[in-house]
Image (cartoon, rainbow, N blue to C red):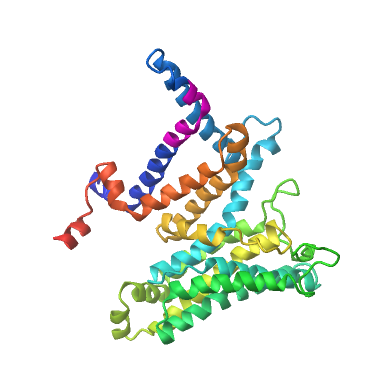
């Protein structure tokens, strides 16, 4: 039992996060001016340096907790709860896009196109949101379907090229990211998308009938998209783990030749996975345009599409692991302002923590070496 735990890939993920926090603590210590001042007389009064180092690390991670989970120093309950709602709001597009990328990874497809798919979903859904004037309920449904269509189209193209011509999905999806970004920039310069009377490249505000309802009222930004992301995680889990199509997708990823020999349509599997992944990324765009931002700008996708790659990897491409990873990265993002204001540290510390997690996730042997974990039995068999 103990050996199974120590060989578990999930333990490696957990320890990768722990190692990142430890190294982050070291960087915080070196960046703190009080520690630097106390270190100058370390040999005379070493406890001052140790105390300053502890205070620096504690205040930094305490600020991250208060900025992302629970602000226990706030005066009212609503203010105390706000950080958690911000974490959930920011995590929503990460979960959507991460689910799609994770599906691709399990099918042997390294999809880098979530950024472009988010943009296309947000652009098409946003246009429906402000240009179409439909009854409440129907308008939101049509706008969400439009975001799905936009993302699915941007996933279908590289899937088709991969299946029919052998074009590498990494190259194609990277190029399509640039196409989507420039297409959005062009659209925002046209009368069809430009807000009347505004000199800035932004669209009109989405009609209230097309906006996601707020779950906890107008005091918070948390919207229905978060619940849809959780529902999508259950849907992807059922598709990949319980359905015939999921088995075929996984078989294509494990061994395309064997899948083809077994009578599976590998080309269709590739196209289907990339299209579904694009649709999920399009839903990430819906969270941005219909839930959080409510107006289309050139930065509507932020860096969610690229961060979702890390989320999918951290979640081991499993739906519920992706949800947890999305929440973690949502917490990192939400805590940035509090970290900067309360602890006096740059927001770049959060980016460093994310980068360290990527580093350790990409190198499991390094994590096993640092924590003296045994090599998994299956790896020993391969290397033998």
Residue 26 in percent (x, y) is at 42, 34
Residue 370 in percent (x, y) is at 28, 42
Q: Is residue 328 above or below residue 192?
A: above
Regarding residue 359, the answer to whether it shows in the image is yes
Horizontal side of 296 relative to 35 (left or right) equals: right
Q: In the depicted view, which residue is nearer to us: 36 or 152?
A: 36
Q: In the depicted view, which residue is nearer to us: 263 or 51?
A: 51
Residue under the image location 31 percent in, 52 percent down:
364
Residue 64 in percent (x, y) is at 55, 38
Outermost residue on the front side: it is 40
Residue under the image location 52 percent in, 80 percent down:
157
Magenta-colored stretch includes residue 32: yes
- Image quadrant where residue 163 sits: bottom left
Q: In this view, does 263 lie above or below 353?
A: below
Q: How many labels does the image show?
A: 0
Magenta segment's dominant SS is helix
Q: In this view, does 139 lie above or below 86?
A: below
Residue under the image location 40 percent in, 18 percent down:
42
Give the residues in magenta. 25-37
- Image quadrant where residue 245 sits: bottom left
Outermost residue on the top side: it is 44
Horizontal side of 32 relative to 185 (left or right) equals: left
Residue 381 in percent (x, y) is at 17, 60
In the picture, which quadrant includes the C terminus?
A: bottom left
Magenta-colored stretch includes residue 337: no
Regarding residue 120, the answer to whether it shows in the image is no
Residue under the image location 36 percent in, 55 percent down:
362
Q: In the depicted view, which residue is nearer to us: 144 or 299?
A: 299
Outermost residue on the left side: it is 384
């Amino acid at each position: 039992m103990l050996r199974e735990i120590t060989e578990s890939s999930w333990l490696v993920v957990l320890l990768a996060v722990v190692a990142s926090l430890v190294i982050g603590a070291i960087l915080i210590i070196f960046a703190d001016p009080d520690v630097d001042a106390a270190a100058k007389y370390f040999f005379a009064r070493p406890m001052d340096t140790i105390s300053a180092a502890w205070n620096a690390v504690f205040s930094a991670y305490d600020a991250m907790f208060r900025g992302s989970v629970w602000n226990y120093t706030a005066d009212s309950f609503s203010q105390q709860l706000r950080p958690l709602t911000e974490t959930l709001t920011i995590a929503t597009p990460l979960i959507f896009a991460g689910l799609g990328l994770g599906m691709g990874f399990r099918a042997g497809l390294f999809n880098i196109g979530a950024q472009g798919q988010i943009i296309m979903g947000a652009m098409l859904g946003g246009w429906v949101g402000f240009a179409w004037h439909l009854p409440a309920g129907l308008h939101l449904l049509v706008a969400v379907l439009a975001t799905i269509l936009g993302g699915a189209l941007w996933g279908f193209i590289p899937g088709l090229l991969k299946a029919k011509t052998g074009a590498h999905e990494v190259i194609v999806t990277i190029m399509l990211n640039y196409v989507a970004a420039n297409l959005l920039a062009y659209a925002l310069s046209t009368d069809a998308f430009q807000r009347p009377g505004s000199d800035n490249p932004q669209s009109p505000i989405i009609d209230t009938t097309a906006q996601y309802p707020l779950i906890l009222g107008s005091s918070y930004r948390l919207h229905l998209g978060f619940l849809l992301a959780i529902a999508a995680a259950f849907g992807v889990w059922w598709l990949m783990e319980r359905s015939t199509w999921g088995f075929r997708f996984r078989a294509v990823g494990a061994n395309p030749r064997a899948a083809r020999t077994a009578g599976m349509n590998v080309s269709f599997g590739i196209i289907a996975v990339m299209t579904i992944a694009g649709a999920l990324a399009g839903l990430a765009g819906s969270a941005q345009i219909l839930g959080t931002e409510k107006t289309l700008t050139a930065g509507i996708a932020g860096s969610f599409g690229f961060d979702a790659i890390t989320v999918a990897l951290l979640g081991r491409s499993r739906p519920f692991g992706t949800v947890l990873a999305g929440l973690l990265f949502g917490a990192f993002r939400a805590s940035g302002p509090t970290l900067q204001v309360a602890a006096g540290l740059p927001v770049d510390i959060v980016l460093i923590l994310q980068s360290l997690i990527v580093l350790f996730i990409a190198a499991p042997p390094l994590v096993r070496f640092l924590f003296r974990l045994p090599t998994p039995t299956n790896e020993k068999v391969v290397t033998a």
